[in-house]
Image: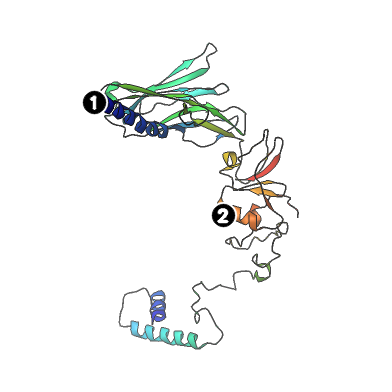
Amino acid sequence: MKQRFAALITGTAVSLVPCLADAHVVIASGYAYANTSQEIAFGVGHGCAGSDTYRVRIEIPAGVTAVRAQTSDFGRATVEQDAAKNVIAVTWQKAEADALDSDSNYYKLLLRLKVPNAPFSTIIFPTHQTCLAADGTFTTVDWVAETETDGGASPAPKLTIVPARRTGWNKLAVPAAISDLSQFFDDAQIVWKDNQAFSANPATVELIKGTSGVEELGALAAGDEVWVKY
Amino acid sequence: MARLAFLRSQADPRPASGKHHLCLASLALLALAACSDGSGSAAGKDSGAPARDTATEPDDSTEDSSTADAGAPGNCLERPNDLVRAPNGQLPCELLPPGLKR
């Protein structure tokens, strides 16, 4: 009997792991523009193993300023500040009576903030998601890891910062090496360095391959200048 | 007959009436005249493409991007009267960066 119970617990735990791993809290507003005040949306795609999200606390990383929270489905947000009055965390929490009986809803949480002047970089917002089950049990998932790791901590929402740009051609300088161009240029029509070109669009990649004198661009080094068309 | 019906629907959207027979006969004559025309006009050949109005569109046959200097990204000319076209296998001018020289 003990063995059966242990197997049941193990099976339940194993089945919950992918559930939790899939329940990312993510940045749902796309790229952020360096040194610009803008809305950043956090998407809460799932609760915790079938129970509804009851509270979300988002830590504000250093360098992010002018933070203002928007009232959400959870109600008003509360902010935590340091001695210098910088916002260091924002929490949204429902009334317990408003918690749903099951994990059925998607939530979007909005912050307006000023993004650091650090183009071609990423910053994470460590996030703590607390769920309330129908039987009154609280569960908290910490989304705090830099990257997704097997069996490790859950990945935090990651904000990708790109330079402010205009529709059309933009000449941009790359401050640090970029090995995966799609990380920062996924929404560009095409990126050029000398006679090398990159595009995340497979159709445009075919055109690059078919144009004589043009080579595919795979990576950029620190200090490179590129022409980018958006 | 299908072409005749098409011409009929294009020429007269009104419901059928007594005058319709006369109109239909005229259209049939026009259609027959077009069919017997050996010049290969748009009405005589069903190419599936709309007929071009050469009186209002510039003749760009000498600058067709599908035939002009294959693989020459630096040779993009200003052709404001050209229609936007599907890619011909090479990068179109609008995706070439400012100042690119071969």
- Is residue A47 at all visible to an observer of this figure? no
- Whether residue B63 is visible: yes
Q: Position of residue B90 (x, y in %)?
A: 64, 59
Q: Is residue A230 above or below residue A112?
A: below
For label 2, count other residues whose C-alpha is less than 10 Å away and answer few (under 14), some (14-19) or many (20+).
Answer: few
Of circles 1 and 2, the one toward us is: 1
Q: Which residue is situated farthest in the left direction here? A: A1
Q: Quadrant of the C terminus of chain A?
A: top right
Q: Is residue A6 left or right of residue A154?
A: left
Task: In the rendered structure, find residue A203 and report the number of the disc placed on it.
Answer: 2
As drawn, which residue projects farthest toward the right? B102
At x 49% / y 85%, what residue is drawn?
A: B34
Q: In the displayed image of the protein, which residue is found farthest to the top?
A: A83
Q: Position of residue A147 (x, y in %)?
A: 52, 30
Q: Alpha-carbon neighbours of circle 1 within 10 Å: few (<14), some, or many (≥20)?
A: few
* Nearest to the observer: residue B22 or residue B2: B2
**Quadrant position of residue A97:** top left
**Residue A120 vs residue A23, the one in the foreground:** A23
Q: Do pointers 1 and 2 mark residues of a single chain?
A: yes
Q: From what the image shows, is residue B91 above or below residue A127?
A: below
Q: Is residue A29 shown left or right of residue A119?
A: left
Q: Amino acid at mark 1?
A: Met
User: Quadrant of the image for the N terminus of chain A?
Assistant: top left
Judge from the rendering whether residue A151 lies leftward or rightward of residue A130; answer left or right: right
Sequence-earlier tag: 1 or 2: 1
Reading the image, the residue beneath label 1 is A1
The image's colour scheme reads rainbow
Q: CA distance from mark 1 to mark 2?
A: 60 Å
Q: Chain of mark 1?
A: A
Q: Chain of mark 2?
A: A
